[in-house]
């Protein structure tokens, strides 16, 4: 199977490794060093070699960083990881609530007399460092380090992967790589830019219609590229990875070791995306005499706005995945009480997806938490944490699949036996928020931050909330967490037709239970209403068709419109999915989709 249940880090090693890092700080005359989760591509997932934050601290979350000073070390994490970090790091590290506490404020408080903080310029973006420098002023100096300090002390650091790259057929992509390169190159030419440096692996995979397997769960290759206004591309990847691949004319392959030399030959106006480009690249291009223009990666928006072929493919993938989920939920309901563990559930669910015959990988490690483990938002079960599923528990299952025609992500929270009133009322409020987002219409031109509150309102009215965004973008056989689109208070990206997002409000009671309900939704042009005065409006089309646990709903809390939406949703689930199910799963689904 794809998922493993090993414990990926050892917090007991933290004190020794922190002491080793401090020895290097003394040698380098530094007062501290920043250790990010990120790699040079700024992706959410990293290769084992780049898991420096986990190696040093024990924290394995997908976002965060450590600021290690001589007498203290802060591990900065957002709301998704505040329970997890306390379980994973040794007391020599202090969890810091981020972004509520800004790194610059923390550094100034810890080093009131000033100091020198080292960083690896390949692991921090231009925008990130500029913001930090602006806030620190001349009180604390940031020092670029040519050889990462963690790499100096990590004796058995794994090598970077170099796996073969494969072509992604136009029958799934909906557009040839030649067309994409010409389209994005024309956008550069229109902006009077000669070229753009690309560091985001999913952008390069989309642009060139290639896929890889260098990163767990995300079908991308570790590479960089330069796209010229002519549509020509310099791809910086180990040539052996593309040995069996026929690339279009106009694409040249160069080993990454020669990338700095290659960048030094560029001339004219070179665009760099300050939110993703490594600071080191900015320095190389400046030294080469290039004129830098700061702007968005030209692949990001075209990739986010799916074409008709991609939409048809992801629709098919979600129907296939819904069948696997319904088979799984029927199986789960049939198991005797107190006979399963979290690992048993994860294995079973992956087996049902494998049985489709189309699964390429899971889209992320399945989050399967029962009871208090459900309150750990990005919980990953291990042999050490594995918990038995007991009667009276809530079981939260957040999972997805990577298929050639689409990427899926779905969360269902289910009742194991009879659960309490607090759990049911909280579940119903989460459901109300999910329904509200599913039903909303809005004037074109609004962004994710304009819509985020819609899903929170039922929880807010009860004095509750959730410490994460309402939704993230999703790719097509690419990253399950795709930018720039989000449903989040932090997102200013305008929502456009063709964008796929998750709709996943939740509620978490630490040491007790967690609740989340998640469907994927597609941004569409809304049908015009008879008395509409707004010129253009958008709405969401649901992609996920799996029943929601009716046993957890306090129906008296639902409005007539909410009740109608749920009944129509369940009726549509049954119509779309039931015909392909086994007799037992079809019988289960008929009951699960009954009207309320």
Image: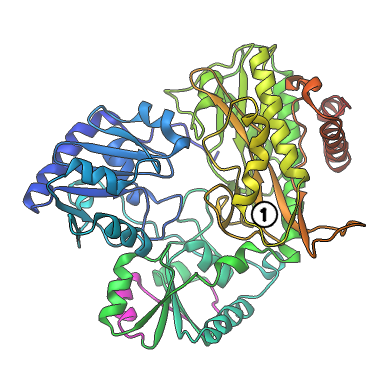
Relative to residue 390, is residue 80 depicted above or below?
below
Q: Position of residue 211 (x, y in %)?
A: 55, 62
Q: Is residue 252 magenta?
A: yes
Q: Quadrant of the N terminus?
A: top right
* Quadrant housing residue 421: top right
Segment tinted magenta in the rendering: 245-266
> In the rendered picture of this protein, how many numbered marks are placed on residues?
1
Residue 73 among those drawn in magenta? no
Kindly identify the residue that appears in the image at 33 percent across and 80 percent down.
Answer: 262
Residue identifier under label 1: 500
Residue 165 horizontal side relative to residue 301, left or right: left
Report whether 530 appears left or right of 79.
right
User: What residue appears at the point 63 percent right and 42 percent down from the top-left corner?
Assistant: 453
Classify 218 as above or below 228: above
**Residue name at image x 58 percent, y 17 percent:** 389
Which quadrant is home to the C terminus? top right
How far across and how far down the image is residue 485, in percent?
A: 59, 56
């Amino acid at each position: 199977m794809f998922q493993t249940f090993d414990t990926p880090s050892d917090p007991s090693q933290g004190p020794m490794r922190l002491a080793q890092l401090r020895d290097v700080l003394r040698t380098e005359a530094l007062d501290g060093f920043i250790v990010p989760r990120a790699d040079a591509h700024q992706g959410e997932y990293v290769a084992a070699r780049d898991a420096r934050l986990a190696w040093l601290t024990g924290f394995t979350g997908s976002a965060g960083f450590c600021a290690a000073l001589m007498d203290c070390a802060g591990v900065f994490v957002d709301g998704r990881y505040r329970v997890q970090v306390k379980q994973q790091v040794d007391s020599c590290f202090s969890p810091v609530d981020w972004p509520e506490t800004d790194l610059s404020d923390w550094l100034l408080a810890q080093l009131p007399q000033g100091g020198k903080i080292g960083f690896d310029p390949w692991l921090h973006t231009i925008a990130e460092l500029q913001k930090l420098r602006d806030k620190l002023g001349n009180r604390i100096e940031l020092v670029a380090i040519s050889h990462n300090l963690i790499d100096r002390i990590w004796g058995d650091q794994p090598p970077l992967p170099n796996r073969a790259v494969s072509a992604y057929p136009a029958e799934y992509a909906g557009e040839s790589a030649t067309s994409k390169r010409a389209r994005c190159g024309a956008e550069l030419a229109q902006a009077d830019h000669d070229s753009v440096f690309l560091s985001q692996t999913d952008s390069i995979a989309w642009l060139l219609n290639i896929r890889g397997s260098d990163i767990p769960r995300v079908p991308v290759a570790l590479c960089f590229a330069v796209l010229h206004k002519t549509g020509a591309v310099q791809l910086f990847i180990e040539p052996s990875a593309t040995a069996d691949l026929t690339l279009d004319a106009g694409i040249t392959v160069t080993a990454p070791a020669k990338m700095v030399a290659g960048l030094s030959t560029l001339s004219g106006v070179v665009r760099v995306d300050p939110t993703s480009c490594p600071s080191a690249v900015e320095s190389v291009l400046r030294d080469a005499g290039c004129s830098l223009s700061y702007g968005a990666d030209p692949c990001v928006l075209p990739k986010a706005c799916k074409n008709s072929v991609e939409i048809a493919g992801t629709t098919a993938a979600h129907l296939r995945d819904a069948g696997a989920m319904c088979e799984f939920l029927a199986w789960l309901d049939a198991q005797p009480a107190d006979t399963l563990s979290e690992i048993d559930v994860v294995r079973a669910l992956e087996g049902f997806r494998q049985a489709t015959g189309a699964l390429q990988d899971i889209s992320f490690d399945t989050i399967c938490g029962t009871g208090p483990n459900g309150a750990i938002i990005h919980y990953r079960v291990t042999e050490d944490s594995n918990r038995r599923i007991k009667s009276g528990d809530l079981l939260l299952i957040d999972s997805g699949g990577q298929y050639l025609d689409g990427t899926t992500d779905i969360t269902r929270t289910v009742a194991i036996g009879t659960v309490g009133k607090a759990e049911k009322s909280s579940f119903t409020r989460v459901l109300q928020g999910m329904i509200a987002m599913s039903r909303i219409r809005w004037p074109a031109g609004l962004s994710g931050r304009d819509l985020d509150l819609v899903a929170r309102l039922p929880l807010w009215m009860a004095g509750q909330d959730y410490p994460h965004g309402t939704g993230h973008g999703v790719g097509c056989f690419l990253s399950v967490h795709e930018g720039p689109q989000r449903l989040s208070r932090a997102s200013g990206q305008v929502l456009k037709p063709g964008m796929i997002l998750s709709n996943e409000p939740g509620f978490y009671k630490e040491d007790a239970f967690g609740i989340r309900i998640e469907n994927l939704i597609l941004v569409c042009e809304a049908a015009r209403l008879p008395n509409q005065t707004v010129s253009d409006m958008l709405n969401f089309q649901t992609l996920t068709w799996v029943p929601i646990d009716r046993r957890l709903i306090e129906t008296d809390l639902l409005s007539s419109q909410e009740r109608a939406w749920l009944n129509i949703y369940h009726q549509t689930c049954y119509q779309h999915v039931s015909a392909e199910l086994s007799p037992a799963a079809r019988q289960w689904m008929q009951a699960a989709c009954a009207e309320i």
